[in-house]
Amino acid sequence: MKFSGKAHKFGADVDTDAIIPARYLNTFDPAELARHCMEDADAEFPNKVKAGDIIVADKNFGCGSSREHAPIAIKGAGVSCVIASSFARIFYRNSINIGLPILECEEAVDAIKEGDQIEADLETGKIRIQGNEQEYQAIPFPEFMQGIMAKGGLINYVKNKTT
Amino acid sequence: MGMTISQKILAYHAGLDFVEAGELINCKLDIVLGNDVTAPVAISEFNKLGLSEVFDQEKIVLVPDHFTPNKDIKSAEQCKIVRDFAKAYKIKHYFEIGQMGIEHCLLPEQGLVLPGDLIIGADSHTCTYGALGAFATGVGSTDMAAGMATGEAWFKVPESIKFIYYGKLPPWVGGKDLILHTIGDIGVDGARYMSMEFTGEVIKNLSIDNRFTMANMAIEAGGKNGIIEADEISLDYVNKRARRDYKLFQSDADASYYELREYDVSKLEPVVAFPHLPENARPVSEAVDISLDQVVIGSCTNGRIEDLAVAASLMKGKRVHPEIRTIILPGTQQIYLEAMQKGYIQTFIEAGAVVSTPTCGPCLGGHMGILAKGERALATTNRNFVGRMGHPQSEVYLSSPAVAAASAIKGKITPPWEI
């Protein structure tokens, strides 16, 4: 899976309340959650994000609650991939389970600026910034985890394997 | 080489004699938990599998506690999904309004979680049950769905950090202060992916309610679980409630730890965490005179009987400040009843506080005490992120029930000894 999109940059410790505030958790409809995605970190984000765009963030992205609504909102907003210096544990697991591609690479995050055009390859873990020769290397996921993300999440992956 | 208590519990549930940090293993689960926010998503995923039954009707626990009693139509629809599922799949431990409580106060109280258990819950504060010597960790809804279907989950065996607390706890300092101080020391990702093992003479003498508070906030340091070995204090609590056998585990003397951290608690003051991260922990003396609009005492962190006892001891015969909205949320119906029998509820009402039915409510900005733009609250809850209790431009400070009660009376952040 290869992605190409514009970077939206965020700082450290972006929590799940910032990704999708609890006041919207009375539904799990992806389109409705997407309308409030990242709203408490950047109120304009739901209006400016375009299909294929990439979220780039500093350490501990997705800390806090276990709400799967957080990666669902990001995926629903059309974000193709999240690149962070590190991810909080439950968010990491949830992203894989619902099929939101993520990559961990501190060097790439340090180099990427807001609005940069990014190319990322889930299979190889390679990340490039358009107009920049440098290539950044995230640790690629094992094949079965890539398979889960490619199939759109754990449940589809399990169903696909058993049928 | 020996194993930590966390590794031993995981190994036992994987049917292995030995596991080491970093290993990927598949484990059998004792309890799978969900609430009215996370269970509807899990049920929707579970339904895609087309199964006619869950793995075990007695090992799934469903508690509608976040937006209940139903705060609006959408929340009512979500609760109905959970209720209908519980009925259709004959889930034994579904707790309807009237029996329910805040999940992490309720499950230990009902004897549903026991030492040595392996528990996953679609709620990040599932780590609370580590106070009983169980391995309990928060997961998302898809993991919950897979858990309900198979009774299993895969885990990466975590590294452990051993926290050793020694010295004599000063008056008004308890579990909440210890854990806020610890998070202040290591940061909100200081134990990311790791197990936090709480030990030392201070923990040995700490009451069960204070232990729940500590294990509860392991997630606030990024921890996978928080854990305290079972001893006389926890077994006294457990044995009154357990309706099945349980198994005790201890860390080996030669277990390997990522890190050891020691704290002399003798000079510790009550701790207040400033907005907007739990790691912004400072002694209460550095927080005095910060004015407040609201005080909240309750939550899965501090909604137990001992928490209410401390608050009542300070509020007895006093009035809360006329410009402060003081909201008290007992964690379960049983805690509510006990607080009533002991006169705490009367104390709170006479002091001018409101007492709510058990709910997560304001802790996550759901209902029952939402903040307006520019307002400030002191809460005994667990998170003070931007917008956590309401408007993105409101502020939450975190503290123990003692500091919260004293502050409600004075109308500003106040050390308990000033009352």
Image (tube, coloured by chain):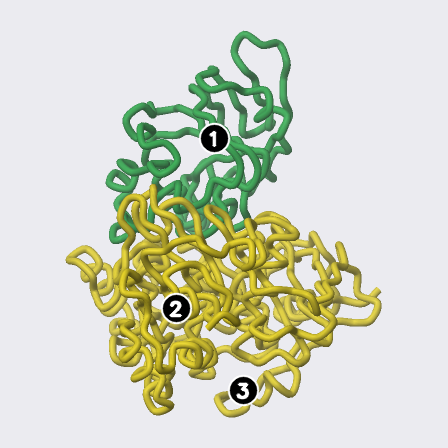
Chain colours: A green, B yellow
Residue B189 at x, y percent in the picture:
59, 47
Residue B109 at x, y percent in the picture:
44, 82
Find the distance from the CA under tag 2 to the CA under tag 1.
33 Å
**Image position of B44 (left or right of A41):** left
The chain letter for the residue carrying disc 3 is B
| The disc label shown at residue B297, or none | 2
Q: Amino acid at mark 2?
A: Ile
For disc 1, the marked residue is A10
Residue B319 at x, y percent in the picture:
32, 74
Disc nearest the viewer among 2 and 1: 2
Q: Residue at x 60, y 24 (%)?
A: A110
| Label 3: element kind | helix
Q: Residue at x 57, y 70 (%)?
A: B175
* Residue B28 makes an appearance in the image: no
| Mark 3 Cα-neighbour bin, 10 Å: few <14, some 14–19, many ≥20 | some
For disc 3, the marked residue is B237
| Mark 2 Cα-neighbour bin, 10 Å: few <14, some 14–19, many ≥20 | many
- Tell me whether the residue at label 2 lies in contact with that at label 1, contact meaning CB atoms closer than 8 angstroms: no
Residue B86 at x, y percent in the picture:
29, 71
In this rendered view, identify the residue nearer to me: B147 or B299: B299
Picture layout, residue B59 above or below residue B392: below
- Tell me whether the residue at label 3 lies in contact with that at label 1, contact meaning CB atoms closer than 8 angstroms: no
* Res. B386 image quadrant: top left
| Mark 1 Cα-neighbour bin, 10 Å: few <14, some 14–19, many ≥20 | many
| Label 1: element kind | strand
**Image position of B349 (left or right of B331):** left
Q: Residue at x 71, y 68 (%)?
A: B165
First in residue order: circle 3 vs circle 2: 3
Location of the N terminus of chain B (image quadrant): bottom right
Find the distance from the CA under tag 3 to the CA under tag 1.
45 Å
Picture layout, residue A110 above or below residue B162: above
Q: Amino acid at mark 1?
A: Phe
